[in-house]
Image (cartoon, helix red, strand yellow):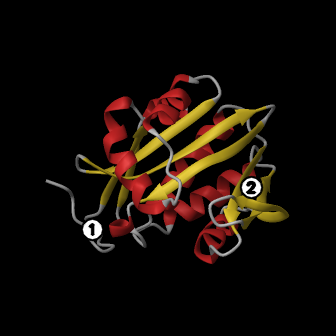
Amino acid sequence: MAAEPQHLTDELHVEVVTMRRRHLRGVLKIEAQVYPRPWSLGLFLSELALRTTRIYAVAKVGPTVVGYAGLMLAAGDGHVTTIAVDPAWHRQGIGTRLMLAISRAGVVRGCSGLTLEVRVSNAAAQSMYRRFGYAPAGIRKNYYSESNEDALVMWAHDTDLPAYAERLDAIEHELVGTTSVEEGLLS
């Protein structure tokens, strides 16, 4: 039985864990709902195999995968490769919890900067990323080939400094409900 959204009550408990093969059925279900050109099972499997340069996490409520995110590590920077939340769970802080987890995991793994691309039309996502210290740095023309939409490139710098850790702590403090993050994700 799938978990139903609890509409931001103090009882909401989200568990963030390392993405594993057993989570991929739920991940692919969300992927198909939110992206015009979803990633394939093979692509997720190849990403999960790159353990030294990738961090992938899922958010679960009970046994149900309600969101996921990925971070690629390269030369002291982290690149958010994907983040998605089941549409039934939007506005529940799931994306924020995932961004907190992968941001902290990236910092633990040596990232002093974090970057991502976001659709220029996705104001809600851009707003969340700004909370995390991301600022616009450029445009990638026609980045989303299925719609020829441009991507806004955003960067968060100095993520390895105490001020960034304080920013993440403040964001976490504002969340409703509780979150547990698998210890192995942050080491």
User: In percent of the image, x 76 and y 62: which residue is there?
Assistant: 142
> Is residue 15 in view from this perspective?
no
User: Residue 8 location in percent, x, y?
Assistant: 33, 73
Image side of residue 5 versus residue 45, left or right: left
Amino acid at dot 2: Ala
User: Residue 35 location in percent, x, y?
Assistant: 50, 59
Element type where label 1 sits in the image: loop
> Is residue 138 in view from this perspective?
yes
Element type where label 2 sits in the image: helix
When asked about the image quadrant of residue 6, the answer is bottom left
Image side of residue 49 versus residue 146, left or right: left
User: In percent of the image, x 71 and y 72: which residue is there?
Assistant: 120
Residue 5, label in figure: 1
The residue that disc 2 covers is 163
From the viewer's side, name the closer residue of 28 and 158. Answer: 28
Of the two numbered discs 1 and 2 in the rendering, the one whose residue sits closer to the viewer: 1
Amino acid at dot 1: Pro
User: Residue 168 location in percent, x, y?
Assistant: 61, 56
From the viewer's side, name the closer residue of 34 and 69. Answer: 34
Image side of residue 12 versus residue 133, left or right: left
User: In percent of the image, x 41 and y 70: which residue is there?
Assistant: 90
Judge whether 116 appears above or below 87 on screen. above
Judge whether 4 appears above or below 99 on screen. below
User: Residue 176 location in percent, x, y?
Assistant: 39, 68
| Mark 1 or mark 2: whose residue is earlier in sequence | 1
When asked about the image quadrant of residue 53, the answer is top right
Classify the position of the C terminus by image quarter: top right
Q: Residues within 10 Å of mark 1 (few under 14, many from 20)?
A: some
Judge whether 27 appears above or below 21 on screen. below
